[in-house]
């Protein structure tokens, strides 16, 4: 009798687990299918390379593509170096000091802070207090703060996964700590660090709430870092929420999904490269 | 000379590490500076327990949004967590390697899709579905919860999977050797051992759900009233800021910063909880 009920329980649980997996797969594919089937057909060279007309009802998305690229580039240029150096410190230098606990807590907090709060902060601090107005500078810096934890975490993992023998060999050869870190550890960790940066690019491309309050929503092509821009994601939001044009919305959403697809592909390729390289090194 | 350079490098690395602390402090200081004078004037209890939100006639009560955030978050957890934990068990315990290798990119893509795209999809498909089947406008707690449930899946799946994988192998082997079935082992040995990891996964998913803005703003209906049923429209704390910041000034603007303070404090508390759990695991 007990055996029997156990068997029923197992079957039910198994069924639920498979059902869940199917749910997740179904959720992803229905989103992809819905957006892409309505949008991909509308992506033409003209759509990508021309200016929007009638508030986005017609024409293309060139300024938003350029704007997104500027925002992401600035964010990565600022957060990349700071993030990698922070990760280096956390992984190689820091013991269990009190500052370390504080740094770790701040990074975790930054990772959890809602993007709209980043937006509020960027608005109060960068747009108003620093006087940067709605601009690429304000938006890019806000994004940089947001992606900092992503870069720190992935880089730290990558640095920590470098085998300990590498460091010992380098130190035994008479290299100093920094020489070891800069010439042995960081190069070995580079693929992992690059993965983190690509991931953070993906996050910045999709970010909307923080950009909305800091980068403005101008439809023109930016000429300097102090110009306002409208990112692709914000453009999509405005098109849809103000009912400007669902068609253009689908096309813009498809462009975003394709971009994310490429980012993910690139990440996986770097990871694979990293693994084969490691295994190659192990075989010799 | 060499030692000096090494020292200098170490200190400059420390400096960049401190940048993280600095940014968090700046965020706290600036949201508090903007929001605090308003809170002092209007009263924290009035602000948090006030039921009426009417900035144009000086009423700034955010109770309906606190409850709104709570409802959609709980809804998202109820729908999302069982599915996510089941997927984590699948990935860590059941899936053959080849299947897992196919499944993982799906989760990564799910995590990568921009939140506005989710919102757009939700607006058309989920809201449309609810509208067609329940004879209501469709913008609702249910739509927002469903949307968020999908969005927290990657977070909860990944962290739960790590937690399940972190359970020592010999626990499982011991249980199997005693004659327990695979499911009995999962239920009575692995899941209890992974408990604190699973709880942090849920908390982190909760943090994501509370903080999400763009996806819910497009499907929730955004009415500042306490929803009476899952089919009623709802406004969350994040929506309140995103919707009105564009044109707010004076007290209205400060009240939105005060809303930001409430969110910030909520997230810090959640994070502190997660950190505590982590520490318990490592001890």
Image (cartoon, grey):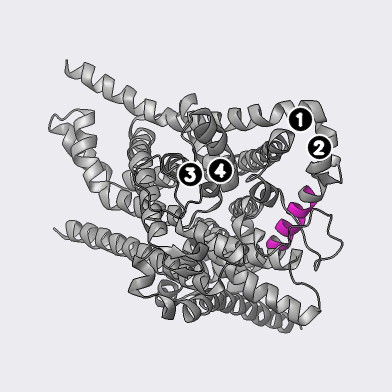
Start and end of the magenta stretch? B66-76
Which residue lies under the disc numbered 4? A119
Tag 2 and tag 1, C-beta contact below 8 Å: yes
Left or right of A149? Residue B189 is right
Q: Residue at x 46, y 65 (%)?
A: A53
Between B194 and A129, the residue placed more toward the observer is A129
Distance, label 1 to label 3, CA atoms, is: 27 Å
Q: Position of residue B97 (x, y in %)?
A: 41, 73
Regarding mark 1 in the picture, which secondary structure is present there? helix
Taking the spot 39% from the left edge, 76% from the top edge, the residue there is: B98
Residue A41 tag number: none
Which of marks 3 and 4 precedes in the sequence?
4
Question: If you read the primary sequence from the N terminus, does the residue marked by circle 2 or circle 1 appear first?
Answer: 1
Q: Secondary structure at mark 2?
A: helix
Magenta-drawn stretch contains B3: no
Chain assignment, label 3? A
Which residue in the structure is indicated by mark 1? Answer: B39
For disc 2, the neighbor class at 10 Å (few under 14, some 14 to 19, many from 20) is: many
Q: What residue does disc 3 label? A: A146
């Amino acid at each position: 009798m007990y055996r029997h009920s156990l068997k029923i329980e197992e079957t039910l649980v198994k069924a639920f687990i498979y059902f869940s997996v199917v749910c997740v797969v179904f959720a992803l594919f229905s989103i992809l299918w819905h957006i892409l089937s309505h949008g991909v057909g509308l992506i033409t060279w003209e759509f990508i390379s021309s200016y929007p007309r009638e508030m986005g009802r017609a024409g293309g998305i060139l300024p938003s593509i350029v704007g997104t690229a500027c925002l992401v580039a600035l964010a990565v240029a600022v957060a990349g170096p700071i993030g990698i150096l922070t990760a280096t410190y956390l992984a190689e230098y820091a013991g269990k000091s009190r500052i370390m606990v504080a740094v770790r807590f701040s990074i975790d907090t930054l990772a959890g802070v809602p993007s709209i709060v980043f937006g509020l902060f960027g608005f109060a601090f960068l747009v108003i207090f620093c006087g940067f107005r709605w601009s690429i500078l304000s938006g890019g810096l806000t994004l940089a703060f947001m992606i900092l934890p992503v870069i720190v975490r992935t880089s730290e993992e990558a640095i920590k996964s470098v085998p300990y023998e590498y460091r010992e060999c380098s130190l035994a050869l008479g290299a100093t700590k920094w020489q070891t870190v800069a010439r042995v550890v960081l190069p070995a960790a580079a693929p992992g660090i690059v993965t983190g940066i690509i991931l953070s690019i993906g996050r910045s491309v999709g970010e909307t709430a923080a950009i909305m309050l800091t980068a403005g929503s101008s439809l023109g092509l930016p000429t300097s870092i102090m110009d306002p821009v409208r990112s692709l994601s914000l453009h999509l939001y405005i098109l849809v929420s103000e009912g400007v044009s669902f068609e253009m919305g689908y096309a813009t959403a498809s462009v975003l999904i394709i971009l994310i697809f490429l980012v993910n592909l690139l990440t996986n390729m770097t990871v694979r490269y990293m693994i084969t390289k490691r295994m190659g090194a192990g075989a010799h | 000379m060499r030692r000096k350079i090494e020292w200098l490098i170490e200190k400059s690395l420390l400096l960049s590490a401190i940048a993280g602390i600095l940014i968090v402090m700046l965020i706290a200081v600036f949201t508090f500076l903007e929001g605090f004078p308003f809170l002092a004037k209007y009263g924290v209890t009035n602000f948090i327990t006030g039921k009426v939100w009417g900035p144009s006639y000086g009423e700034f009560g955010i109770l309906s949004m606190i409850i709104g955030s709570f409802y959609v978050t709980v809804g998202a957890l109820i729908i999302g967590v069982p599915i996510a934990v089941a997927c984590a068990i699948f990935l860590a315990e059941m899936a053959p390697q080849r299947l897992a290798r196919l499944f993982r990119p799906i989760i990564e893509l799910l995590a990568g899709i921009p939140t506005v795209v989710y919102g757009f999809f939700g607006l058309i498909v989920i809201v449309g579905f609810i509208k067609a089947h329940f004879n209501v406008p469709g913008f609702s707690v249910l739509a927002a919860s469903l949307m968020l449930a999908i969005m927290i899946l990657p977070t909860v799946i990944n962290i739960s999977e790590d937690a399940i994988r972190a359970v020592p192998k010999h626990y499982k082997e011991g249980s199997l050797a005693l004659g327990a079935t695979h499911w009995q082992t999962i239920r009575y040995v692995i899941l209890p051992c992974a408990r604190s990891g699973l709880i942090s996964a849920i908390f982190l998913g909760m943090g994501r759900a509370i903080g999400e803005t763009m996806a819910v703003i497009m499907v929730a209906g955004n009415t500042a009233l306490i929803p009476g049923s899952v089919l009623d429209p709802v406004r969350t704390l994040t929506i309140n800021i995103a919707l009105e910041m564009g044109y707010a000034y004076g007290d209205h603007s400060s009240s939105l910063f005060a809303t930001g303070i409430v969110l910030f404090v909520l997230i810090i508390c959640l994070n502190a909880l997660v950190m505590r759990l982590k520490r318990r695991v490592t001890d």
